[in-house]
Amino acid sequence: MAGLDPAIHVLLRATKNVDARDKPGHDDLHRTMSVRLKLRDIDFFERPVQFARPFRFGAITINATPQLFVRVEIEVEGRGVAIGASAELLVPKWFDKRPELSPAQTVDGLRWSLDIARGLYLARTGYQTAFGLHASCLGAQVATCAKKNIPPLAAAYGPAEIDKAILDALLRAAETNFFDGTAANIAGVDARLSPDLSERDIRTFLSGRVPLERVAIRHTVGLDDTVEGTGGVADPRENAGARYFKLKLSGDPTADATRLARIGEELDTLGRDVKVTLDANEQYADLAALQSLMGRLDRDAALLPIATRLLYVEQPMPRDITRQSPLGALAGHGFIIDEADDSYDAFPAARALGYHGISSKSCKGLYKSIVNATRAAKWSAEGESFFVTGEDLTCQAGLAVQQDLALGAFIGVTHAERNGHHYVDGFGDTPAAEAAAFAVAHPDLYTDDGQGIRLKIHDGDLLTGSLNTVGFATSVHPDWSALRPLERPTSLQEQLA
């Protein structure tokens, strides 16, 4: 695979088989595997997020979109009641790219996904594990969303966000942190949704994790972003010292090759070793178009600065075309799926087509990320390299970025795309007191640069030390009184019913 070095992800190595009980500092709680809970309530909120610059990917340009916040209340067997939280942007035209839908309609699809999931989750009234609750609702979630013409990727959004909040509450009730709790499998992750794995595969992977203390940022260069000069690829005020760059593609091989050559010239001026990934967001129509671009990368001297730094290419073709198109000889370049990752069996199916990687995104489901990381470790131990990458659909400062960062650090993602520091001005419209509370609680992750609180990037890396706190990677919850209730979805139901 092109440029794929042994250090790209620890998942390219076999998982270290260390039982969680052998780790120092584990008490009786950590020796317990899963804890049962029952859900008492779920509330959704949102807050507008204005972007500092347009973000163009695929066929959409985003200047603003709401951020979702989830608050759940659970009762943990033998441990009482706890509150948990999660957050994620409601991103238009990514989960559902159908051209006949407006951006607002696709956001409404996500709101419907949340609403449907809330009903299904609250209907389960008995005690069960966090993963058991997820697994018991997922099939009905996908089926119910399909009746409303909501595709599987968007259908998964609702459970993904609820699951994160439930896990936060569960960890708080158990008085443990995400890394220790997940290593001990407090959520009860099992193989019922991944029959290609065994229970032992999952237990071995989880108990052997050694979370990363640093995760490098991968700086995104959007299709409308400046390439040369002030504000460009090589401007340290923009790239924050990144050693990894994610370059968006338009789907036009000629235009993409020309732009990549310009970016390569800028990367050559940085004076440090950098790597790149390419992301087409489904814009390459078919294998022929993709072969045209990859042929240019193989032969064009002007693209050598990109080709020699290339780690992998992300989701080049539409998800439906992807499932019908074995990569053949192209597989050697290293490809991953992202938007085509809409089910628990997507990674094995992609592997059969020649793909070697898959993305981890909290908005697609943290349990699926764990299962896919288990697969990558198991398959890689058999001789061929497979990996999970960290891709970020603009996780914002606060809950979203912290929970996604912790997930990546746990499963072994050594570098992750980070958009929030670049496309949004720090905490954006978050109340100053709330932003300050996050900064005080997580001083290794945030800094006040005199113009507001924003991510603190250390020589191109984010530090994970302060994520080692009771709960899911956060000591702070949002100021719920400063949020408005999630808008009720209307347009998608009315126009697609």
Image (spheres, grey):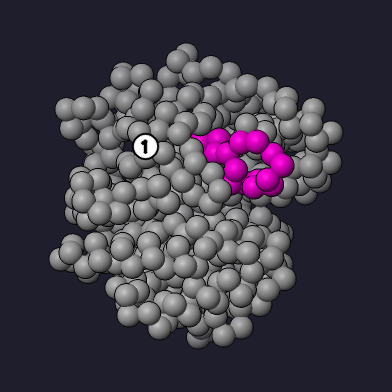
Q: Position of residue 237 (x, y in %)?
A: 20, 45
Q: Main secondary structure of the magenta part?
A: loop
Indicate left or right for 221 with 346 as reference. Answer: left
Point out the image quarter for the C terminus: top right
- For the question of whether residue 247 can be seen, the reply is yes
In magenta, the rendered stretch is: 85-103
Question: Is 102 within the magenta?
Answer: yes
Residue position for label 1? 53
> Which residue is pictured at 53% across the width and 17% down the height?
484
Q: Is residue 88 part of the magenta span, yes or no?
A: yes
Q: Residues within 10 Å of mark 1 (few under 14, many from 20)?
A: some
Please say whether residue 20 is visible from this viewpoint: no
Please say if 279 is above or below 236. Answer: below
Identified at 63% across, 64% down, the residue is: 285
x and y, in percent, of residue 304 in the image: 32, 77
Q: Residue at x 55, y 72 (%)?
A: 290
Residue 51 location, quadrant? top left
> Which quadrant of the figure contains the N terminus?
bottom left
Q: Is 100 placed left or right of 472 in the picture?
A: right
Task: Examine the image and state in which quarter residue 415 appears.
Answer: bottom left
Residue 173 pos. (x, y %): 50, 34
- What secondary structure is found at the residue carrying circle 1? strand
Which residue is pictured at 71% across the width and 49% down the height? 152
Depth check, front residue: 287 or 147? 287
